[in-house]
Amino acid sequence: MNTHTEKFKVRLGLFVIGGLALFVLAIFIIGKQKNLFDPVFRLSSTFYNVSGLQIGNNVRFSGINVGVVDNIRIINDSTVKVDMLIKTDVWKFIKSDCEVSIGSEGVIGDKLMVITQGSYNAPLAKDGQNLASKEPVETDAIMASVQVTAANVEVVTQQLAEIMIKVNSGKGTLGRLIQDESIAENLNQTIVNLKKSSKGLDENMTAAKHNFLFKGYFDKKAKVAADKKKKADSGK
């Protein structure tokens, strides 16, 4: 009987010790997440929509976790206030003109607060100061924009397909131009005629230069051009 009682006491003692160890470990983990064991100071910011941000989410500065979200409360129908606990050792980098935005851990990860870097000459942020905020871009709005764009692309693609069908069937001006060989031949003949006209114009201009009625005009024009070139060369 005594042996059984002693075994029970040993088991009870081990259970109590294990429970206390788990309790202390839980307190340590929660305290570390809440920065209970580190000196902290408080900052806040207000948003129209916090996009699913929760108490306990991380606060980042320059890509490093420097604190946690301590409290989220609704001020009025258009304002939500977010309180943050920030480690004191990064206080010297947080300026009064820093801005706060809401980001996420990857594409579909947890939400987090992001503090941007302030200007070099700005004073340090004060304990309890309310920093300016940047409203987050809603994922639903992005998806709606993508859907509208996809719908527009679908419409444009369908219209292009209809145009190509008409072109291939010889409908419309472009279709007749491509499919009708007589139009293509007329176009080629027009180009040939233009080349002949251009050649004839060049021949007429050459003849006019040698004609005594126009020779003085062309000689004067050539002299003016030569004088301009001479002045330009002397100016260099």
Image: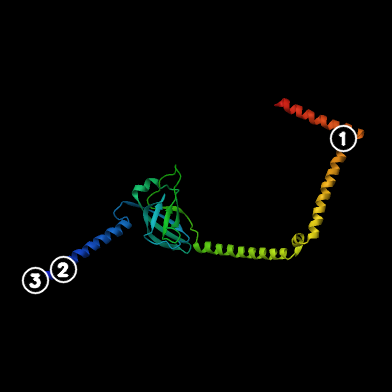
The quadrant the N terminus occupies is bottom left
Tell me the quarter of the picture where residue 180 sits: bottom right
The residue positioned 80% from the left and 55% from the top of the image is 187
Q: Nearer the viewer, residue 61 or 180?
A: 180
The residue positioned 41% from the left and 55% from the top of the image is 44
- The Cα–Cα distance between marks 1 and 3, rounded to whole angstroms, is 136 Å
Mark 2 neighbour density, 10 Å: few (under 14) some (14–19) many (20 or more): few
Q: Position of residue 26 (x, y in %)?
A: 27, 61
Position of 10 relative to 114 (above/below): below
Q: Amino acid at mark 2?
A: Arg
Q: Nearer the viewer, mark 1 or mark 3?
A: 1
Mark 3 neighbour density, 10 Å: few (under 14) some (14–19) many (20 or more): few
Position of 66 relative to 171 (above/below): above
Residue projecting furthest to the top: 234
Q: Amino acid at mark 1?
A: Lys
Q: Secondary structure at mark 1?
A: helix
Q: Which residue is mark 1?
A: 209
Q: Secondary structure at mark 2?
A: helix
Whether tag 2 and tag 3 are in contact, CB under 8 A, the answer is no
Say which label, 2 or 3, has the lower sequence index: 3
- The Cα–Cα distance between marks 1 and 2, rounded to whole angstroms, is 124 Å
- The Cα–Cα distance between marks 2 and 3, rounded to whole angstroms, is 12 Å
